Amino acid sequence: MRRRTILTIAACLAILAGLLPMVAVAHLLRVRAVAAEQRHMEEYARWTLIRANQVFADARRTLLAAEVPPGTECSPEHVARLRQIAMDARSVEDIGYFRDGRLACTSLGPVGQRVPRTPPDLRLGGGFAVIFHLQPRTFRSQPMLAMSHGGYTALIKPERLVDVLTDSHMTLGIAAGPGRLIALSGRTDPQLLRTLIAGPTAGIDDHHVFASLREAPLTAFAFSDRAQALGRLRNDYLLLLPMGLLVSTLLVGLVIWVSRQRLSPEKELAIAIRKREFVVHYQPIIDLSNGRCVAAEALLRWRRPDGRWIGPDLFIPLAEETGLISPLTDLLIERVIEDQAALLRADRDLHISINISARDLESGRFLPVLTEAVTRSGVAPSQIWIEATEQGFIRAEIAAGAVEAARAAGHMVAIDDFGTGYSSLSLLQGLPLDALKIDKSFVEAIATDAATSVVTPHIIDMAHGLKLRIIAEGVETREQEAYLRAAGVRLAQGWLYSHALPASEFATFHQDRKVQGDGASARRARARSGGDAIAAR
């Protein structure tokens, strides 16, 4: 009996000695998995916060663009402008103008019914305010988010704030102010919502793994099922149980490695580049002297297989941060040549501008790719212009070498978005540039009281002094066009002429503008001939 007891105790101790290390390793693996899932949730809470800020920034720009001189509100021209702005805005569904506390008109036209203005729930800087849940009165809709500035209010679908690509099943949300939920991509229990909105926090409860981040006045959060996080370990547990501590340790490393290789935004972008999910749209550039379309800026667009469009404001910064900008540039060059080679060969006066990142400009790696594509297609090098932002020219000595190489290959080089960075006259004088693009913020300031309005003529004079061609970006009104033409600016692009177009639509636009330009030139020639004949008599 005693021997049996000793053997039993020894067997139990042996079992415990064998199982305890395995239990410890399994527990460590579980803890690591939860921590990885928490970091995963924090990452997507951060992406949600970025997305919400982008939506608000787009709404701010839209509201400012909707403003017209006093006395012209709700005129047919103003309503048409509101309609166009609402159509072009990525995040705004409708725009309305309030007069004396009542809705006077929207992008659909004048409003006959009595619709009072709703007081804001949150006031932001710069005169902007937000209403969290507004029920539209002029059309059927679920409650919407509203942003107002002055007499204008823009309606936003709440789900746009949480429109973020995810690599697994999870719920995303945005809140603001004192615990006010704005948008939620799924469902959850009220207690968890209160915890997340009160954040920032990260943790795990009986049902969820969650994280929230705050950037006043917004709080973003993400959570997934706890079973989803722990479910990934079940097969590993089966392998761990019959194995020793060494095998357990190896499996921990394997799980960590696999978790790091999970599908992330960076991985999604890399796959999209490999699968060529990107297309190019072309924003026409107009010759102000005759109205012809003489060029276009090539702009990348990401179309997902399900038909959704991802804005460049999301994927371009990610590509630059992760080093994927170089293959993206190669794809841009390839698409431009595929789309426009025939049109460029038919019209040797036409050129296409492509944007080059600071990294590619300094390395010069894009130039052999571009040279090979141009040579193969029969397009003249002078028909492909290279644009780079001011950031690309900060390291002036390196940038100057790249610019000289590009110009030696026959390409024209322009500095893009001039005036928004740290450019100076000495920097421009030290670079062999051909053209300067005035940032749209300075064009928008024309004929306004904005502080930047006094900068625009100085930029134009400086460019003329350096004998640079000038392209004005963001032209939206005839008044801006007239000012630029009078100031000697030859080229312009913006919503006044066209938004960015697919390749086939751009070809049609180019031909139509060519016919219009030829007709205008003929009329001017006849007018001059008539004037000469009168003078002769």
Image (cartoon, grey):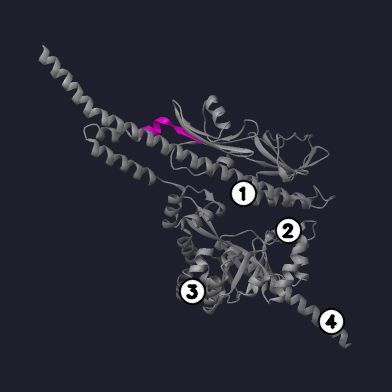
The image quadrant that residue 288 belongs to is bottom right
> For mark 3, what is the residue?
374
Q: Nearer the viewer, residue 459 or 12?
A: 12
- The residue shown at (49%, 76%) is 378
| One can see residue 163 in this view | no
Q: Which mark is residue 90?
A: 1
> Can you give x and y, in whole percent of width and height, for residue 400 in the image?
56, 73
* Side of 289 where 39 appears, left or right: left
* Residue designated by label 4: 531
Q: For numbered disc 1, what is the local secondary structure?
A: loop
**Residue 385 among magenta residues:** no
Q: Earlier in the sequence, mark 4 or mark 2?
A: 2
Please report the residue visible at 74 percent of the width from the left and 50 percent of the height from the top.
Answer: 66
Q: Residues within 10 Å of mark 1 (few under 14, many from 20)?
A: some
Q: Amino acid at mark 2?
A: Glu
Q: Secondary structure at mark 3?
A: helix
Q: Is residue 21 left or right of residue 399?
A: left
Q: Nearer the viewer, mark 4 or mark 3?
A: 3
Q: CA distance from mark 2 to mark 1?
A: 19 Å
Where the C terminus falls, by quadrant? Answer: bottom right
Front: mark 4 or 2: 2
Q: Indicate which disc, 4 or 3, sits on the residue closer to the N terminus.
A: 3
Q: Residues within 10 Å of mark 2 (few under 14, many from 20)?
A: many
- In what element is the residue under mark 4? helix
Residue at the spot of label 2: 444
Question: Which amino acid lies under the numbered mark 4 shown in the image of this protein?
Answer: Gly
Q: Amino acid at mark 3?
A: Val
